[in-house]
Image: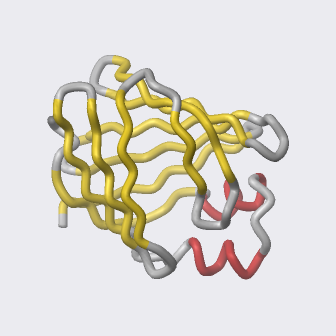
Amino acid sequence: MAFDGTWKIDRNENYEKFMEAMGINVMKRKLGAHDNLKITIKQDGNKFTVKESSTFRNIDIEFTLGVNFEYSLADGTELTGSWNMEGNKLVGTFTRKDNGKVLTAHREIVGEELVQTYIYEGVEAKRIFKRG
């Protein structure tokens, strides 16, 4: 329930390098770094509803902890995987459909911020959100 609420992007760390590792072209990387992403999270037991709203798209995602689902990134990359709780952290493990490589993501509350960490091919990036 700590994740519940609306979160607005505040800053990124190493996000362009991460997008480059993902194979996203330079124009989309420049745009992606300034997408004005807003995430609304609602948790009901093991079920989560996440609304992502950005300059480029609006999408609703529903998932249950530990249950695989399909998801596509803003650039069209398709993934399959699941989220799990590890302590106070949401940990996602996703496999790209196009090349079979793994993307991991962590969401955790640090102080008053939601920190999303992504790791792909050894490149780590963070997106830090504030309640909005």
Q: Nearer the viewer, residue 119 or 102?
A: 102
Q: Left or right of 4: which side holds 128?
A: right
Where 125 sits versus 9, above or below? above
Q: Left or right of 131: which side holds 105?
A: right
Q: Left or right of 30: which side holds 70?
A: left
Residue name at image x 26 percent, y 40 percent:
109
Residue name at image x 49 percent, y 62 percent:
12
Question: Looking at the rendering, which quadrant does residue 77 occupy?
Answer: bottom right
Q: Position of residue 21 (x, y in %)?
A: 77, 53
Q: Position of residue 76 (x, y in %)?
A: 67, 63
Q: Nearer the viewer, residue 95 or 107?
A: 95
Where 11 sits versus 83, above or below? below
Q: Position of residue 83 (x, y in %)?
A: 44, 30
Q: Quadrant of the C terminus?
A: bottom left
Q: Quadrant of the N terminus?
A: top left
Q: Position of residue 53 (x, y in %)?
A: 37, 70
Q: Nearer the viewer, residue 25 or 111?
A: 25
